[in-house]
Image (cartoon, rainbow, N blue to C red):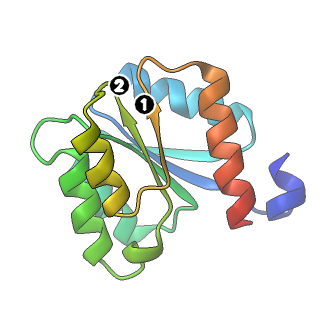
Amino acid sequence: MFERLFGRKRKPRILAVDDDPHIAGLVKTIMEGRGCKVDIAPDGDQALKQFQSKKYDLIILDVRMPGRDGLETLEMLRLLPGGAKQNVIMLTSESIMTTFNRAFELGALDYIAKPFALKDLVTKVETYLSKKA
């Protein structure tokens, strides 16, 4: 699918940020199976470092992580060069409206609730990557 959007020589690049290696690995496996290139960061600090060294078409960012949580990471990301326009989808097991509202205030495009259906992940990622292409 992404070949017609991004061209044959370029795969869309995603950064999956989650302290749970199983969730991050699942996102990587699913989206690489759909033709994306996926990097993994285990925490917010590592995600910010990776963002500064590579360009991403989309970041999938967990909300609850030890240390810098997803909302703090998103807030810091917005201050970095290029970070204000970075596409981000939040990944969360929370159902607290203040968390969702804050994520949207910081410019998150959407959220995916954990546990997530694989189809929901693929549909949302494909929707936002299609808009970016």
Give the side of residue 68 with respect to residue 37, left or right: left
Give x and y (percent) for residue 80. Answer: 30, 77
Front residue of 126/9: it is 126
Q: Residue at the far right: name it.
A: 4
Q: Work out which quarter of the rendered image holds the C terminus and state it.
A: bottom right
Question: Is residue 36 shown left or right of residue 46?
Answer: right
Secondary structure of the residue carrying numbered label 2: helix
Most extreme residue toward the left, as rendered?
Answer: 67
Label 1 secondary element: helix
Q: Position of residue 41 (x, y in %)?
A: 34, 44
Q: Toward the viewer: 33 or 81?
A: 81
Q: Nearer the viewer, residue 103 or 68?
A: 103
| Callout 2–callout 1 Cβ contact below 8 Å | yes
Q: Is residue 65 left or right of residue 18?
A: left
User: Looking at the image, is 71 positioned above or below residue 64?
Assistant: below
Residue visible at 22% across and 34% down in the picture: 64
Q: Amino acid at mark 2?
A: Pro
Q: Is residue 85 left or right of residue 101?
A: right
Residue wearing tag 2: 21
Confirm whether residue 11 shows in the render: no
| Residue type for callout 1 | Ala
Q: Quadrant of the N terminus?
A: top right
Residue 118 falls in image quadrant: top right
